């Protein structure tokens, strides 16, 4: 195993089709027009010394290290900023340029500490390498003169240091923050000798606008910006390419290791989803994997108020099997089920649903996607014919207008947000539809043309009024509709949306959005060229979630914004493997590949593969499982990698359901909130401890590679196999690749997927004979279902209504540094950015209630109440309050209600009528819950026999 | 399961299909319930039709589910 070092070509690749041939030191090289001499030379295998250039950034030409001579031209141009020309003859190491480079290097080194042996970058420093390359042998100017050697180190960021004494002011960090990340947190302050890198308003990194993405650390050629983990552990000695286990962007990382110790995670330049960029979570927040809270031994207990007993794997698995069999014997085959995890790999998810269908003999399998993107499955299935985003991420580079609906990319999907911001800085336009002023509405060099700050719960009305404008102002792409869509359904839809009751003016009162903004946004989307829609859980988590997804699909079809680069309908998936867990048949009504269990054809494929008769009836969805538990017909549950108690709505109802079950098996890294109600705890493995694949929001199947042995002894797929074997249904895979072989054999969209192929390159499904190289863009010539289907989207207001008792609307979301229920990120230094959940409230609403910034407030809905601190902000409109759900102490889901999407039962997290009032501290319920948590996490000192 | 909750869910489904012009609303509602509700939910729903308020098309769909063709 070696340390992977990507080649740095110094400047960016050019996409011109016209090629230019030149000569570098006598070697002919052909490159696209516009390529720099530096890059062309590197492609010819000749590295020109450089300091301020790197191929992720635009060339800058400040260090003068890369000088070359060009025959027939005067002087010594900088090779990073000089483009190639046909027939050019370049000399990269004439005496003259070598002398010049050495002189420049001498100046740099005269103001640089000479402590290479003890420097954290020793062995990985471009300054050191370049000094070697230019043959620096002496520094004639002593270090007694004015210098920066005593400049202080800023260690405020929990993950990296800024040691100003080592800075060579190449400004790579400043440019990375601007060009790659788009945050503009850094500047070069002062001039000449006094110039230095400054964060924010010349303040510590931690308090500046820095979002800790790590782009500057990566760009820095010296030890100035350096990961604290490298300072502590030393340079890594080998690396393994794997995939981030946080969000649906699916960034590729090199896990850089010393032995089985992760030294750092570095975004991989060849990663197709992230192209070498990262966010704070994937880059830095991996410490949870070795957090002392991790449970590494299986545990059992008879009753949930007993302390846990540590036992062997055999005892724990035997307990699961005997309990599940006992329950089935008593209450029937359908009385147990599973919940698969969008955090686990495709292979693990596939096995868990197989466990339910083949070993349990029922279809009681669901996934946390139930509570996030199940409406996407239904809505896009109905309109386009399959449940997936239509584009790859790169497509955004061709977008002329982006419509972001109910999503907050800079927090939820940060690396993709950086791509969006880049395109917006290049001139693309932005429409934001969100009740809250998300960062993208206005941030450095990005400003939305329209922000439709709609009242929570009125998505369908807004989407239909946008359609109204498009139809009544003749902005339809008639050719597209005629050739690609069902015309009858289109005419019905067009007549429906054209009804005067759907005009922006008529709906203004309902939606709270001024009509002219809706009209402007509709015109912009329909006429700006390539229109791309990106949406998130603000679309799906409503009682009309599925209807909004269909309304979005309608808009894209009506304007011809489907089937090519730059357009499309793109659900931004929350968790790393939401797409994959849905693809793998985690839903109770569908076998892998979105094929309904009632289909005899598809059942027979699996009956043949699995050697059992399959149940043709749909199983229970997560919310139905809790209802059935309370009814006494559902008594056993295996939950892999999900904390349903904290993440599902109406916590009291969930806990009642869990309490009513006779055997709850939690398979997780930590004793999570659900484990308070569990009888068996099976320790899980992190993404660093297993092989497998994740599928990101662009349908890209990325390899996950094991970099260390499972700390608890078994990878999650092995644990599922053990349960199945103990239940009497044999599973004997030797490696996850064999599971993928089975998936490919049985699922047409995955037919061409193998580990051998993924080892070379990630691929986007469908990948089969028809699309041997995968499918970056879907529905190119025709929709998956044939013709696109327009659906009528009648607005049905939610029954969750404000009134005198609960006059405000609560909506929920997440923030950059924390991830979902926070089980992982709360166990990292990311807590410095978000130590607790807070309630955002408009200053007017706060004043009406006598609430000040930072006060404790009681947040109550008709189903429950909790307390948290208030933050006064105009990001939320009057009448709307907002919070996150990352911390179990707050338990925002105590407040959310049982209302759900009509088609899929996806909970209505985004609309809850609430009241906010001043409070002295935590609520009685929170106190009781904290007691319960302490009690239920006791582990007995003596292991059970 | 609570008949009222199931009836509420069925009415929600109904509200969508009622507005679809070219679909046989009753058949679509019945189909949706068959495809997405686990048998015990359907059983509990159909066992208490007299006790709950259902929109007309939803009631027709329920009757149809009671007596499969
Ligand atoms: S970590 Fe990212 S956001 Fe912070 S200064 Fe560096 S590039 Fe900018
Ligand atoms: S911190 Fe690093 S990247 Fe930034 S200017 Fe200094 S040496 Fe260059
Ligand atoms: S954007 Fe998502 S996938 Fe990429 S590093 Fe951040 S959390 Fe991981
Ligand atoms: S690398 Fe070309 S001027 Fe710095």
Image (spheres, coloured by chain):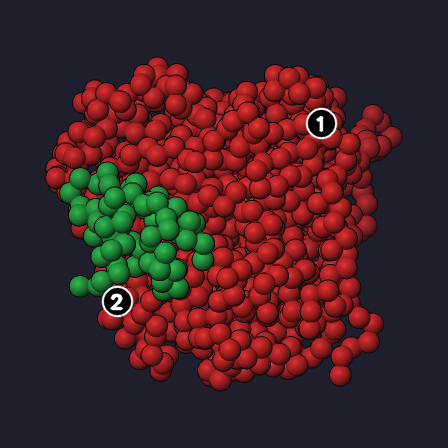
Chain colours: A red, B green
- The response on whether ligand 3 sits within 8 Å of label 2 is no
The subunit carrying tag 1 is: A
**Which one is in front, A719 or A901?**
A901
Q: In the rendered image, which quarter is residue A767 located in? A: bottom left
Does the image show residue A735?
no
- Which quarter of the rendered picture does the C terminus of chain A lie within? bottom right
Rendering coords of residue A245 (x, y %):
55, 55
Rendering coords of residue A668 (x, y %):
62, 63
Question: At 42% from the left edge and 20% from the top edge, which residue is drawn?
Answer: A512
Q: Is residue A905 left or right of residue A485?
A: right
Rendering coords of residue A874 (x, y %):
58, 20
User: Disc 1 marks which residue?
Assistant: A918
User: Disc 2 marks which residue?
Assistant: A599
Question: At 73% from the left edge and 55% from the top edge, which residue is drawn?
Answer: A933
Image height check: is A390 above or below A527? below
Q: In the rendered image, which quarter is residue A1 located in? A: bottom right
Rendering coords of residue A370 (x, y %):
45, 53
Neighbour tally class for label 1: few under 14, some 14-19, many 20 plus, Cα within 10 Å:
some
Q: Is residue A101 left or right of residue A492?
A: right
Question: At 21% from the left edge and 25% from the top edge, which residue is drawn?
Answer: A498
């Amino acid at each position: 195993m070696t340390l992977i070092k990507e080649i740095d070509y110094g400047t960016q690749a050019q996409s011109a089709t016209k090629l230019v041939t030149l000569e570098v030191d006598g070697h002919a090289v052909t490159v696209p027009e516009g390529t720099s001499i530096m890059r062309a030379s590197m492609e010819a295998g000749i590295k020109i010394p450089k300091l301020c250039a790197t191929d992720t950034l635009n060339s800058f030409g400040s260090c003068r290290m890369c000088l070359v001579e060009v025959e027939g031209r005067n002087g010594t141009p900088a090779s990073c900023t000089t483009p190639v020309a046909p027939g050019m003859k370049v000399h990269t190491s004439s005496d003259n340029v070598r002398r010049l480079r050495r002189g420049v290097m001498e100046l740099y080194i005269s103001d640089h500490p000479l402590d290479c042996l003890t420097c954290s970058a020793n062995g990985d420093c471009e300054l050191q390498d370049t000094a070697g390359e230019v043959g620096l042998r002496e520094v004639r100017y002593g270090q007694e003169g004015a210098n920066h050697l005593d400049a202080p180190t800023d260690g405020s960021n929990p993950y990296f240091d800024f040691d100003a004494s080592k800075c060579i002011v190449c400004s790579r960090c400043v440019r990375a923050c601007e060009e790659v990340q788009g945050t503009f947190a850094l500047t070069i302050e002062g001039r000449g000798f006094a110039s230095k890198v400054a964060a924010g308003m010349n303040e510590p990194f931690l308090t500046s606008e820095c979002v800790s993405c790590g782009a500057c650390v990566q760009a820095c050629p010296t030890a100035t910006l350096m990961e604290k983990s490298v300072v502590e552990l030393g340079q890594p000695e080998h690396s393994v390419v794997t995939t981030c286990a946080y969000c649906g962007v699916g960034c590729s990382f090199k896990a850089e290791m010393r032995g089985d110790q992760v030294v750092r995670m570095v975004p991989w330049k060849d990663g197709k989803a992230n192209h070498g960029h990262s966010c704070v979570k994937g880059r830095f927040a991996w410490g949870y994997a070795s957090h002392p809270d991790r449970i590494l031994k299986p545990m059992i207990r008879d009753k949930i108020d007993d302390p846990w007993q540590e036992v062997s794997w055999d005892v724990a698995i035997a307990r699961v099997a005997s309990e599940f069999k006992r329950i089935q014997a008593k209450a029937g085959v359908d009385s147990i089920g599973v919940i698969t995890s969008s955090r686990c790999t495709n292979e693990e998810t596939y096995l868990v649903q197989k466990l339910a269908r083949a070993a349990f003999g029922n279809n009681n399998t669901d996934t946390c996607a139930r509570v996030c993107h199940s409406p996407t499955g239904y809505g896009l299935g109905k309109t386009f014919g399959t449940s997936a985003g239509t584009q790859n991420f790169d497509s955004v580079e061709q977008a002329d207008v982006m419509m972001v609906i109910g999503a907050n990319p800079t927090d939820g999907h940060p690396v993709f947000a950086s791509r969006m911001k880049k395109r917006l800085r290049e001139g693309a336009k932005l429409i934001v539809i969100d009740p809250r002023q998300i960062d993208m509405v206005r941030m450095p060099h990005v400003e939305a043309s329209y922000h439709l700050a709609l009242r929570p719960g009125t998505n369908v009305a807004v989407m239909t009024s946008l359609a109204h404008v498009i139809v009544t102002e003749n902005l339809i792409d008639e050719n597209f509709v005629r050739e690609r869509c069902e015309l009858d359904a289109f005419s019905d839809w067009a007549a429906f949306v054209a009804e005067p009751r759907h005009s922006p003016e008529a709906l203004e009162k309902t939606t709270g959005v001024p009509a002219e903004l809706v009209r402007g946004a509709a015109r912009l989307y329909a006429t700006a060229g390539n229109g791309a829609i990106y949406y998130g859980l603000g679309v799906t988590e409503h009682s009309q979630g599925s209807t909004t997804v269909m309304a979005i699909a309608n808009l894209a079809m009506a304007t011809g914004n489907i089937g090519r680069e730059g357009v499309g309908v793109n659900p931004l998936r929350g968790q790393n493997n939401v797409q994959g867990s849905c693809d793998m048949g985690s839903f109770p009504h569908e076998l892998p590949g979105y094929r309904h269990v009632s289909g005899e054809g598809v059942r027979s494929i699996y009956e043949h593969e699995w050697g059992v008769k399959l149940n043709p009836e749909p199983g229970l969805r997560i919310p139905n499982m809790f209802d059935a538990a309370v009814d006494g017909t559902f008594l056993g549950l295996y939950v892999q990698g999900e904390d349903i108690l904290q993440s599902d709505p109406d916590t009291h109802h969930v806990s009642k359901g869990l309490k009513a079950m006779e055997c709850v098996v939690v398979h997780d890294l930590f004793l999570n909130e659900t484990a308070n109600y569990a009888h068996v705890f099976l320790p899980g493995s992190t993404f660093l401890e297993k092989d497998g694949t994740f599928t990101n929001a662009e349908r890209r199947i990325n390899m996950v590679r094991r970099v260390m042995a499972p700390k608890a002894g078994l990878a999650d797929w092995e644990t599922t196999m053990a349960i199945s074997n103990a239940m009497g249904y044999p599973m004997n895979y030797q490696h996850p690749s064999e599971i993928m072989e089975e998936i490919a054999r049985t699922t047409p969209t995955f037919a061409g997927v193998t580990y051998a192929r993924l080892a070379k390159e990630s691929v986007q499904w469908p990948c089969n004979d028809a699309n041997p190289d995968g499918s970056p863009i879907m529905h190119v010539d025709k929709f998956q279902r044939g013709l696109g289907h327009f659906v009528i989207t009648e607005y049905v207001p939610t029954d969750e209504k404000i009134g005198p008792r609960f006059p405000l609307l609560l909506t929920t979301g997440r923030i950059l540094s924390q991830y979902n229920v926070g089980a992982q990120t709360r166990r990292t230094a990311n807590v410095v950015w978000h130590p607790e959940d807070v309630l955002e409230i408009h200053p007017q609403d706060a004043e009406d209630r006598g609430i000040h910034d930072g006060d404790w407030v009681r947040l109550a809905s008709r189903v429950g109440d909790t307390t948290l601190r208030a933050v006064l902000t105009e990001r939320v409109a009057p009448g709307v309050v907002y919070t996150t759900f990352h911390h179990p102490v707050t338990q925002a889901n105590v407040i959310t209600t049982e209302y759900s999407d009509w088609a899929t039962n996806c909970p209505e997290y985004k609309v809850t009528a609430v009241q906010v009032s001043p409070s002295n501290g935590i609520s009685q319920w929170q106190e009781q819950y904290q007691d319960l948590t302490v009690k239920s996490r006791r582990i007995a000192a003596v292991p059970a026999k | 399961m609570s008949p009222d909750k199931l009836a509420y869910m069925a009415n929600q489904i109904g509200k969508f299909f009622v507005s679809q012009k070219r679909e046989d609303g009753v058949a679509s509602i019945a189909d949706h319930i068959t495809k997405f509700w686990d048998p015990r939910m359907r059983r509990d729903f159909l066992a208490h039709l007299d006790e709950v308020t259902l929109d007309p098309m939803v009631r027709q769909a329920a009757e149809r589910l009671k007596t499969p063709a």
